[in-house]
Amino acid sequence: MPVKQLKTHKKSHKQKMAVIDQRKRTTNVFDCLNADRVTQSQTYQVGQYLEVFLYAENGARRPYRGIIQDCIDEEWEIKFMEKKGDAYVWPVKDDISLMPGSDISQILPPPTLIGRGKYKFIS
């Protein structure tokens, strides 16, 4: 008798956000006391801007910038910005992901508004 294979489907954005909401409700207070976490001798806090490097399917390493919104089960909820030319903008549809502290490459100073929703990170 042949074995039936189950089809796997990717979770929709709504389903992912429901998982994040559920994690927020079940977060242990001690996991994110004051939303601070020390990782690799670096302290991260809600509201800090940061840079994360992610790898594409072709192996290319790309930098992404965003802001820490919350700490959930020892991972950071990060709202990412889009790069438009030499500036960054907030996307129309929020791009929010959970990332471990080990994926954060550096803390950035808050960006400067350079006009009509465009921001620039000045080092």
Image: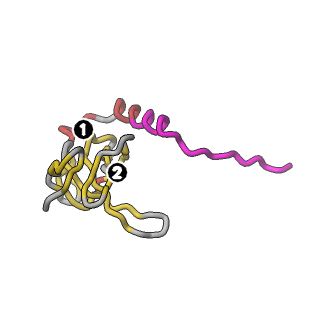
- In this rendering, the answer to whether 33 lies above or below 58 is above
Q: Quadrant of the C terminus?
A: bottom left
| Residue indicated by mark 1 | 30
Q: CA distance from mark 2 to mark 1?
A: 18 Å
Residue 10: say if magenta: yes
Q: Crowding at label 2, few (<14), some or many (≥20) Cα neighbours within 10 Å? A: some
Residue range of the region highlighted in magenta in the rendering: 1-20
Question: Where is residue 67 drawn, in percent x and y?
Answer: 25, 47
Hey, what amino acid is under mark 1? Phe
Residue at the spot 21% in from the left edge and 42% down from the top edge: 46
Q: Position of residue 43 (x, y in %)?
A: 17, 52
For image coordinates 69% across by 45% down, the residue present is: 6
Circle 1: element type: helix
Q: Nearer the viewer, residue 75 or 86?
A: 86
Q: Indicate yes or no whether the magenta region holds residue 117.
A: no
Q: Give the mark toward the camera: 2 or 1.
A: 2
| Picture quadrant where residue 87 is located | bottom left
Which quadrant of the structure image shows residue 22? top left
| 39 versus 94 height, above or below | below
Give the overall secondary structure of the magenta segment: loop
Out of 68 and 63, give the one closest to the viewer. Answer: 63
Residue placed furthest toward the right: 1
